[in-house]
Image: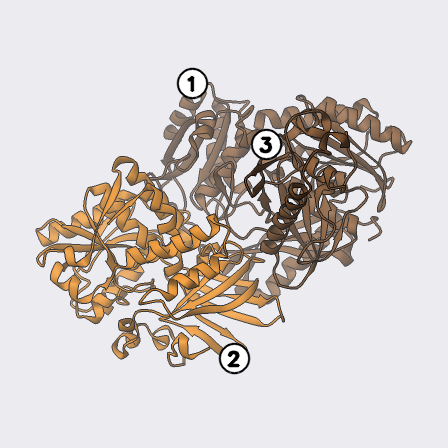
Chain colours: A orange, B brown
Amino acid sequence: MRIDMADTHDFARGAAFLGTGGGGDPYIGRLLLQQALRKSPAARVLSVDELDDDALVVPIAGMGAPTVIVEKIVGFGEGERALRALERRLGRKATAIMSAEIGGLNALYPVAIATHLGLPVVDADGMGRAFPELQMVSFNIFGQSSAPMAMADEHGDVVLIESDNNLRVERLARPLIVPMGGLCMLALYPMSGRAVKQCAIRDTLSLALGIGRAIGNARAEQRDPFESLFAHLRTTEYYRHCRLLFDGKIVDLKRETLRGWAIGHAIIERFADGQRLEVTFRNEYLRARSDGRTLAIVPDLISILDRETAEPITTEGLKYGQRVRVVGASVPPIMRSERALEVWGPRAFGFDEPFVAIEESA
Amino acid sequence: MNPTPLRIGIDVGGTNTDAVVMLGRDVRAACKSPTTADVGSGIANALTEVLRQAEVQGADIGAVMIGTTHFTNAFVQARSLAKVGVIRLAAPATTSLPPFADWPDRLSDVVAGPAHVVRGGYNYDGSEIATPVREEIAAAVAAIRDAGVRAVAISSVFAPVNAAQEHFARDIVLQSIPDAAITLSHDLGRIGLLERENAAIMNASLSAIASDVLRAFGEALAALDIRCPLYVSQNDGTLMPPHVAARYPVLTFASGPTNSIRGGGFLSGLNDCIVVDIGGTTTDVGVLAGGMPRESSIAVDVGGVRTNFRMPDVLSIGLGGGSRVRQAGQTISVGPDSVGFRLRSEGLIFGGSTLTATDIAVAGGIVTLGNPVAVRHLERGLVQQSLQLMGAMIEDAIDRMKTSSGAVPVVLVGGGSILAPTKLRGASEVIIPQQAGVANAIGAAIAKASGEVDQVYSYEQLGRDAALERARTDATDKAVAAGADRATIRIADVEELPLQYLPGSAVRVRVKAIGELAGLGA
């Protein structure tokens, strides 16, 4: 599979949907990918099965607050320095790049930097969505180590973290985001091809592209983009349980950049009856709740989309008065296992309630 | 702004300059006149005619409001734009995506001057990414000056949090290019470096024609002894004084559709309706919700350049009075191509040889215009099917803009409003107001007054709710001071930007309150 210039809008849109508000501004990611594709005609995408067992696959991701990404725009230098530092530590060159989370910038940047550096990118990620913390990834659930991990900022500063505990890596890294200006690029979870085959969520680059196309094609053909989106999601293995959660206008918005995250909530008022929905977010939309009842909660997907065009809106793109539709969808079964829910279920985000799958909360 | 209640509203469009004289809610006179290349003489012609019709003197007029798509059109068509030098204070950050990174070639070829990403910028917490270096900025300025460029856009990372570096760079530019037309990004935009920088570049590119056009406005009025205050329509339907418009021409960008939607609402007496503006080439469908045009929630491209302006949500379809009608076998198509302003020479009823939507309307007996004999030969089936298709195109556009499945009132405005059927699916009623052809000029004349608060509050001391309430109250008071009727004021925008480098949970709060001009007798 290849991703070329003609695919960039659809891919960015699908990545924004799966990013559930986070993962960083897909627009910046798309511009970087387009910049890379001007020099090299297509991004080379490898399916997981195409990987050699002893290949060295390095996920690359941004860490920090989405509100910072749209101002302090990340470049190729940050990711390249993080990758090179990790390669120096491992004494080996990476054979392929991978996305840690198939959401927003973190879906697009790995494809962009791989193309920029002439490397292939793997059609997979570690969650089939986006999450705000480093240990919230299937690689961790399967016992892969996030360290050694390299962090790089725009100044050329590089920090290398060694630890055998992925939660400790997150705790060590998070405070460093502040002196790095709220945003840095990471090279982490270096893995063999064999390990990728065991623990990655497969085909998610293709899935993002397909979701983006379903919305984009419907718009181009003047069909209802939401119908097209739902019809497409129902054909996928991971996201087939999906529905419209709410339809209304943003009447309150609270958003703060705290400890390296964008934290807050959006209140949406329904057109039909004035009923309100509260969507809580920490980089990603985590819980949608109305009238004392939870409609969808992590790790299931919650996306906020423009109600006319079905363009996904990131947490930093939310504005007072916007008219939006809120959509919920299931995640791969592996993401809902008991072990997985301990790491990214509602309680991991401080919600005092159990996970209820979206197909059961209707 | 209320010495005498007579007001003039002017709409300077690409083809026509329309003018109306209004007293309170009454339209005393209205006229259409061709737009001229120099803008000013077209306005003068329209003003002369409308004053004559209203039987008033220029000195009797209390206020003039001008709405114009002139700047939007100039930018989109890359016409009369100045080359812009850009200084972005950001390095070592952001260098992978320099200024103009996502501009279409046809615009960057015209607008892009020397662009430099120099050391500087702030982090989200107000700390500096890098301290700006005077010599580095001076070298960038020298390159701009040596290229003969005098329009300059200055941006910096997180300028809305701290504008000091943009001011620092501006002073260096002025030392080297004393007559530079400088736009600072923080004056125009919010968070989002590329969009804010784009707005600053667009604005700087319009600096040369902005002063010319605003001077032409003023001269046209002075020549007719109109000495009252002049205002220019903004994107959101509110007014700004001419010196602000001359400095920030981008603020007029979406005022055309805004005025047409508001004008349609005013003429129909409705606060909630769909306004369908049928022109020569396109039909623009917008929504009036609670008296204000519904805004687009996604980033809006202007001429292919991304911005974060707040703009009305308008759906444009290729249907207008000049749309070509074609028949191929059983299939009939209308538009999207149009003979445009050449309708009056190319349409069948005007002696031309092109079958247009207007010809169909005349043949169908919907409207009396031109020479009806010229369309008598058209097959009845073709005419009926074409009319149905045109109706269906409008119905489909209306349906896509609706927020609920219920029927809503539809107001038709614009020169092509005569083409539409008087019954439309999804419409509870179809209203074609008497002055539908000059809805834009009326929209300008009934523009709103606004008040804006942009201030830092301590949420720790006040609490968020109390702080927001204070900001709303202050913005409302300012709107009243600017002439708004208190009973009609709505909060149009609330934006919070936490300033973490200040103690006490300091948050920069921006609130905009908008209300009807008092004295309109709402």
Disc 3 residue type (three-letter):
Asn
**Alpha carbons under labels 1 and 2: distance apart:** 65 Å
- Residue holding disc 3: B73
Q: Which chain does the numbered disc 3 sit on?
A: B
Q: Which chain does the numbered disc 2 sit on?
A: A
**Alpha carbons under labels 1 and 3: distance apart:** 30 Å
Q: Is residue B73 above or below residue B234?
A: above
Give the quadrant of residue B343: top right
Q: Is residue B246 left or right of residue A357?
A: right
Disc 2 crowd rating (10 Å Cα; few below 14, some 14-19, many 20+) is few
Disc 1 residue type (three-letter):
Asp
> Which of pointers 2 and 3 indicates the residue nearer the eye?
3
**Alpha carbons under labels 2 and 3: distance apart:** 50 Å
Q: Position of residue B27 (x, y in %)?
A: 84, 41
Work out whether residue A269 can be spotted.
Answer: yes
Q: Residue at x 39, y 52 (%)?
A: A213
> Which of pointers 1 and 3 indicates the residue nearer the eye?
3
Q: Is residue B519 above or below residue A326?
A: above
Q: Which chain does the numbered disc 1 sit on?
A: B
Numbered label attached to residue A292: 2
Q: Is residue A57 above or below residue B139?
A: below
**Reading the chain from its start, which is encountered first: label 1 or label 3?**
3
Q: Is residue B321 left or right of residue A58?
A: right
- Residue holding disc 1: B146
